[in-house]
Image: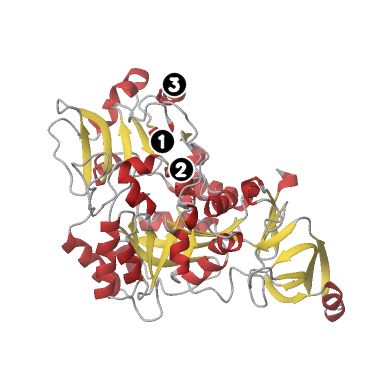
C-alpha cells in the first residue's frame, strides 16, 4: 500500500522548470509521478493515504559539507556567532562563568572579530579578568583559531617557552608574550588537554544537530566529525545510536586521515553504500583560513606581506597522506582555501588519481587561479563550495588578498561554465545551516556587511543554486539514481516551502521558509508543531 502527494507545485529537479501534479510513494521510495487524475486511477486499489500538501515541494536539501556534531556543539554551548563586539563577548563569558562548577571548562563557539568595529582578536587577559577560576576556550568561526585564557594555557602546559608548531601559529605580541590565540595545528596544544566529550554528550549533540537540520529542510549531510571526540569508535557509536534509530537522516561521513586506520581496524569498508549511514573520502587539511591569514597563497597577503599562509603538512607528508588513501582504495577530500594549497592538491591528484569510478573532493576552492581551473577540468574532482562565504567574507577579503585575486575568488559560475561539478554546503557550524540563505548568496552574492554585490558575473541562476543543494551532492557520492530528485526509484525525501523560488523576486530568496520536511515518506518536521 502507498501514499499519494498532491496539491501544491512539485518541482522534480529533473530539469529546469520540470514539475508534476502528484507523486505516488511506497515504503519510502517514489514509485510514480505525473498527473493527479492518472495516478489516482492507476493506483486506486493501492492508495491507503493521501497528502494534500501546502506550499511548493522540492527534493529534500543535501548539505555537501558540514560538521554534524560541531553544529550540535554550537547549539548546546555558548554561541558567539551573532555577537557584534568584543565587549559583548567578554560580558557573555563572564555571565556564563557564574553558572559553572569549580574548575569546569567554559567553551564558546563561533566568534568573528571581522564583525566588530575593532577587528582585533580577543586577548587572554581580557578573559582572565572575567573568568580567572575557569579555563576558557573560545573558538573562532572558521575553527582554524581559538583563544584561551591563562588558566586553560596553564592546564595545557603552554607558556612563554613553548615552541611553535609545524602547520600552526602561536600568537605573540610585540614583546614576545603569548596573547592566548592559537591558529590551525597550534590549537592542538590546548585542545589535547580539554575534557573529552563522553558518549552521552555526543549522542545529544548528534540528535540536537539533526533535529535542527531537519527543521531547515536538510534531509542529508556530508559530515566530517570522526577524529575529534575521543576517537573513531565512540564518535561513530554516537551516530549509530541516533541515526536512523531515533532520527531519520542520511549521513555520509568523511573520515579524517587520523581516524582512517581505526575505521579499517573496526572492520568497516568506506566503499559500501547505505541508505542512512555510510563512509566517504579520507579528509585532510592542506591549509588554514583567510580570516587568520593561514590560507596558503602563492603570493603574500596584501595586508601582511610577511606571510603567504600556513601549510599544514610538508610536501612529503601531504604526498604520503594521498598515498595512504590510495592504499585504502579511497578518494580524498582536501580542505584547500588558498590557490597554493589547491595547486599542491591538484599536482598530487594528477600524479595519483583516485580509484576507478571515484572522485576526489576539493573543499572550499575559494582562491583559484585560471590556470588551476584549466588543470581541474581534466581531473575526476568535484568542488565543495560554500556560497555563504561570499556574503560573510566580502568586503574584508579584498584587503586580505587584493583586488585582482579577489576578482578571481569564489568563482562559482566559472566552475559551472567549465563543467566542474560543484556541490553546496554550509560548513556548519562555521556558517549558518540555512540552505535558502546559501541559495540566496549563490544567486545574489550580496555582502551581509554593506549590502553590495561582489563579482556579479559569478552569480548563479536560481535553478543552478538549487542544484547545489539537491542534484549535485547526490552525484558527488554516486547516489544520483536515488537521491536529489523527485523521480521513480528515488528516496521519498521532500521539503515544502512557503513560496515558489522561481516565481518571486530573487532578492527575496532568503525570506522563504520551510513548512514541512519529509524523510523516507515520513513527516519529520512541521512548522505548525514548533
Return the residue nearer the eye: 220 or 444.
Answer: 444
**Quadrant position of residue 336:** bottom left
Percent x, y of residue 446: 52, 45
Q: Nearer the viewer, residue 372 or 457?
A: 457
Rendered image: mark on residue 392: 2
Query: What residue is shown at x 43% (from left), y 33% (from top)?
Result: 115
Whether residues under marks 1 and 2 lie with C-beta atoms below 8 angstroms apart, the answer is yes
> Can see residue 421?
no
Taking the image as shown, residue 412 lies to the left or right of residue 380, namely: right
Comparing labels 1 and 2, the label whose residue is closer to the camera: 2
Q: Is residue 498 above or below residue 481?
A: above
- Circle 1 sits in a helix, a strand or a loop, which is it? loop
Q: Where does label 1 land, which residue?
A: 112
For the rendered model, the colour scheme is secondary structure
Q: Earlier in the sequence, mark 2 or mark 3?
A: 3
The location of residue 252, given as percent across then percent down, is 48, 63
Instruction: Indicate left or right for 423 with 178 as reference.
Output: right
Quarter that holds the N terminus: bottom right
Q: Which residue is mark 3?
A: 91
In terms of depth relative to the viewer, which is nearer, 210 or 377? Answer: 377
Q: CA distance from mark 2 to mark 3?
A: 24 Å
Mark 2 secondary-structure assignment: helix
Which disc is residue 364 wearing?
none
Q: Is residue 452 above or below residue 439?
A: above
Which residue shows up at 38% across the image and 39% down it?
396
Q: Is residue 117 above or below residue 378?
A: above
User: Relative to 104, is 356 above or below?
Assistant: below
Between disc 3 and disc 1, the foreground one is 1
Amino acid at each position: 500500500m502507498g501514499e499519494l502527494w498532491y496539491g501544491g507545485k512539485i518541482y522534480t529537479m529533473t530539469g529546469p522548470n520540470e514539475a508534476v501534479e502528484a507523486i505516488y510513494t511506497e515504503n519510502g521510495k517514489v514509485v510514480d509521478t505525473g498527473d493527479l487524475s492518472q495516478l489516482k486511477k492507476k493506483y486506486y486499489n493501492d492508495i491507503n493515504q493521501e497528502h494534500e500538501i501546502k506550499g511548493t515541494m522540492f527534493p529534500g536539501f543535501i548539505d555537501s559539507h558540514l560538521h554534524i556534531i560541531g553544529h550540535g556543539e554550537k547549539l548546546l554551548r555558548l554561541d558567539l556567532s551573532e555577537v557584534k563586539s568584543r565587549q559583548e563577548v567578554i560580558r557573555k563569558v563572564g555571565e556564563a562563568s557564574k553558572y559553572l562548577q569549580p574548575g569546569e571548562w567554559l567553551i564558546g563557539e563561533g566568534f568573528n572579530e571581522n564583525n566588530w568595529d575593532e577587528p582585533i582578536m580577543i586577548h587572554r587577559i581580557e578573559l582572565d579578568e572575567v573568568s580567572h577560576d575557569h579555563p576558557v576556550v573560545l573558538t573562532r568561526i572558521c575553527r582554524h583559531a581559538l583563544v584561551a585564557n591563562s588558566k586553560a594555557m596553564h592546564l595545557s602546559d603552554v607558556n612563554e617557552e613553548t615552541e611553535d608548531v609545524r602547520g600552526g601559529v602561536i600568537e605573540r605580541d610585540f614583546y614576545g608574550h603569548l596573547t592566548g590565540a592559537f591558529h590551525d595545528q597550534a590549537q592542538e596544544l590546548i585542545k589535547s588537554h580539554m575534557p573529552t566529550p563522553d558518549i552521552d554528550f555526543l549522542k545529544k549533540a548528534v540528535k540536537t544537530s539533526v533535529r535542527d537540520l531537519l527543521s531547515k529542510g536538510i534531509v542529508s549531510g556530508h559530515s566530517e566529525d570522526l577524529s575529534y571526540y575521543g576517537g573513531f569508535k565512540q564518535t561513530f557509536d554516537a551516530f549509530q545510536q541516533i541515526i536512523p534509530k531515533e532520527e531519520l537522516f542520511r549521513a555520509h561521513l568523511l573520515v579524517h586521515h587520523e581516524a582512517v586506520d581505526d575505521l579499517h581496524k573496526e572492520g568497516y569498508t568506506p566503499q559500501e553504500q547505505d541508505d542512512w549511514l555510510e563512509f566517504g573520502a579520507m579528509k585532510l587539511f592542506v591549509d588554514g583560513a583567510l580570516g587568520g591569514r593561514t590560507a596558503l597563497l602563492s603570493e603574500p597577503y596584501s595586508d601582511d606581506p610577511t606571510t603567504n599562509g600556513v601549510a599544514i603538512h610538508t610536501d612529503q607528508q601531504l604526498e604520503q597522506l594521498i598515498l595512504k588513501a590510495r592504499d585504502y582504495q579511497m578518494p580524498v577530500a582536501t580542505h584547500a582555501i588558498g590557490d597554493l594549497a589547491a595547486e599542491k592538491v591538484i599536482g598530487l591528484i594528477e600524479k595519483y588519481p583516485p580509484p576507478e569510478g571515484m572522485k576526489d573532493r576539493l573543499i572550499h576552492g575559494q582562491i583559484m587561479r585560471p590556470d588551476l581551473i584549466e588543470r581541474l577540468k581534466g581531473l575526476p574532482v568535484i568542488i565543495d563550495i560554500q556560497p555563504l562565504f561570499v556574503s560573510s567574507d566580502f568586503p574584508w577579503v579584498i584587503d586580505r588578498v587584493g583586488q585582482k585575486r579577489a576578482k578571481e575568488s569564489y568563482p562559482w559560475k566559472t566552475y559551472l561554465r567549465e563543467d566542474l561539478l560543484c556541490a553546496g554546503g554550509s560548513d556548519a557550524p562555521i556558517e549558518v545551516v540555512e540552505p535558502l540563505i546559501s541559495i540566496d548568496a549563490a544567486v545574489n552574492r550580496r555582502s551581509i556587511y554593506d549590502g553590495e554585490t561582489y563579482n556579479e558575473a559569478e552569480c548563479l541562476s536560481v535553478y543552478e543554486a538549487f542544484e547545489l543543494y539537491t542534484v549535485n551532492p547526490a552525484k558527488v557520492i554516486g547516489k544520483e539514481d536515488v537521491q536529489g530528485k523527485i523521480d521513480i526509484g528515488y528516496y521519498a525525501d521532500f521539503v515544502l516551502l512557503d513560496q515558489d523560488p522561481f516565481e518571486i523576486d530573487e532578492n527575496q530568496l532568503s525570506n522563504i521558509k520551510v513548512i514541512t520536511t519529509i524523510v523516507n515518506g515520513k513527516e519529520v518536521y512541521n512548522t505548525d508543531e514548533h
